[in-house]
Image: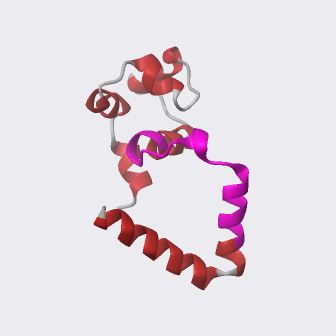
Amino acid sequence: MSTTKAIDKTDPREIRRKLGLNQQQFWSKIGVTQSGGSRYESGRNMPRPVRELLRLVHVEQIDIQRVKREDMDVIDYLKSEESDLFKTLKKSAKSKKKAA
């Protein structure tokens, strides 16, 4: 099961509580108002971009304020033009993360 599928079935309220954040702290990190987040926690359908941001920021623990457009351009280039290098770098990064 992919992470996206897992987050679809995961209660955002549960994630927020596990992180020990109030609604304002939790939702503002992904650009959602407290009232909007409250509606998602109450069962309102969450749009895919919001789900993805929730996953990246609160599950994967990625600081999206540090990600630059240039970084995404490099990733896109590597994926399309240097796919073997991209796969090698990705594998090395995963190995390093596991060793840490």
- Which residue is rendered at x = 47% and y = 23% of the image? 37
Instruction: Tell whether position 59 is magenta.
Output: yes
Which quadrant is the C terminus positioned in? Answer: bottom left
Instruction: Tell whether position 60 is magenta.
Output: yes
Front one among 66 and 54: 66
- Which residue is rendered at x = 56% and y = 42% of the image? 64
Q: In the image, residue 53 lies at what x, y percent?
A: 53, 41
Q: In the image, residue 52 lies at what x, y percent?
A: 52, 45
Q: Of all residues shown, which one is farthest toward the top?
A: 35
Location of residue 78 by image quarter:
bottom right
Which quadrant is the N terminus positioned in? Answer: bottom left
The answer to whether residue 62 is visible is yes
Helix, strand or loop: magenta stretch? helix
- Which residue is rendered at x = 48% and y = 25% of the image? 27
Q: In the image, residue 9 lies at what x, y percent?
A: 35, 44
- Which residue is rendered at x = 52% and y = 75% of the image? 89
Residue extent of the magenta highlight: 57-77
Tell whether 7 sits left or right of 99: right
Is 11 above or below relative to 97?
A: above
Tell whether 7 sits left or right of 84: left
Q: Of all residues shown, which one is farthest toward the bottom?
A: 84
Is 76 above or below relative to 89?
A: above
